[in-house]
Structure formats: C-alpha cells, structure tokens
Amino acid sequence: MQAIAVETPVEDSPGEDPIAELVRGGKHREALTACVRTHHAILGRLCMALLGAQADADEAVQETLLRAHRAMPTYRAEGTIKAWLCGIARHVCAHMLETRRKGRELLEIVPAAGEARDAFEARRRTRLVREALEKLKPSEREALVMRFVADLSHREIAVACGLDEAAARKRTSRALARLRSIVPTEEIE
C-alpha cells in the first residue's frame, strides 16, 4: 500500500491573516499601514491602561509601530499579529515606566450636579481601578490589561507574554481575584 502525501499550502489556508501575508511577502510598509488601520485603537487602549497618560500612550503606540516595522523581517508568525503587536507594546510601556518619573496628579474640583457630577463619578471610579491596578504585580496588571482592555484571548496573552496558555489563564484569574480584593465591587459601581 502506498501513502499519498497531501500538501496544504500555508498561505492559502482559510483564516490566514492578510497582514501576516504582507509581512511574509516582504511588503513591510503595506503591512505597517494595515497594522495601523486594524490595531491602532487596541494598542492605544492598551498603552493608555498601562501608562495612565494619553501623551505617553500616544508615544508608546508610535514606538510600538516603529519597533514592529523594524522587526518585520524577523517575524515568526507564532501567534496573531494583534498578539505580537501587544507584546511589543507591553515591552515599550514597561521601558517607559522604568525610565520616566510618575506622579502626574490632577486637581479635581467636585462639580455641583447633573452630568458634570456623573463625569466626576466616572473619573473617580477610573482612578480607583487605576490605583488598584498599580498595587498589582506588573505581570498581573499586564495580564488584566491585555485581557480586558486589548481584548486578547488567553492564547494571545500567552504569545504576547511568552507563556503557555494555561499560565496566561491562571495569571489573569489570579490578578482579577487580587484586584477584586483590593477594590470591592460596590466602590466602583
């Protein structure tokens, strides 16, 4: 009995990421443009959640995209482009947090009533969550931000953080439990 070899082309497989195809095809400028168009918002939210300041987040997104463009010739397609970009953003934000002084505090005046009061309450809840996130270990904070801000799956978090999927799932679960112990749910509702 003779075995028949069946070849399935990798590039023609259903669900193939068109950005990954551009990267593999050496069309790095087009791939970068597609990354910006497709993933800019996710990267912005991720960086904002990790850094806490819009100007820093904008800078981090730009640096992430520059690093991604420079790294495209060595892209190994071990996960999704989104997970790869979030992993780069994670490193960029960690570097920025190490080298920059924190301490931008804004003076808030309590508004009288109505919509302004609602906005104040939303900022208060956001500040409570941000302060609680700062009390977590960096690896726990990153896992939560990647899961709930960047909307990455546990598999994508694993790729971005260099873990296996079970470890990413466990890290996210433990971080969420720890966050809940720091900030009781009734305080942020």
Image: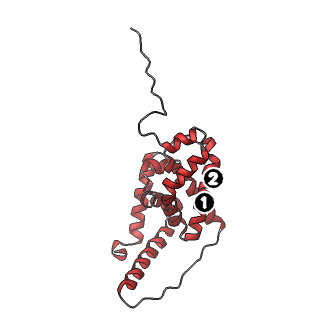
Instruction: Provide the residue designation for mark 1.
Output: 62
Specify the amino acid type for callout 1.
Gln
Q: Position of residue 92 (x, y in %)?
A: 60, 58
Q: Position of residue 73 (x, y in %)?
A: 63, 42
Residue 99 is drawn in which quadrant?
Answer: bottom right
Instruction: Work out whether residue 65 can be spotted.
Output: yes
State the residue at coordinates (49%, 34%): 11
| Secondary-structure class at tag 2 | helix
In the displayed structure, does residue 57 sit left or right of residue 168? right
Spatial CA distance of label 2 from label 1 is 9 Å
On residue 182, the disc is: none
Q: How is the image coloured?
A: secondary structure
Q: Is residue 73 above or below residue 12?
A: below
State the residue at coordinates (46%, 75%): 127
Q: Position of residue 88 (x, y in %)?
A: 57, 53
Specify the amino acid type for callout 2.
Arg
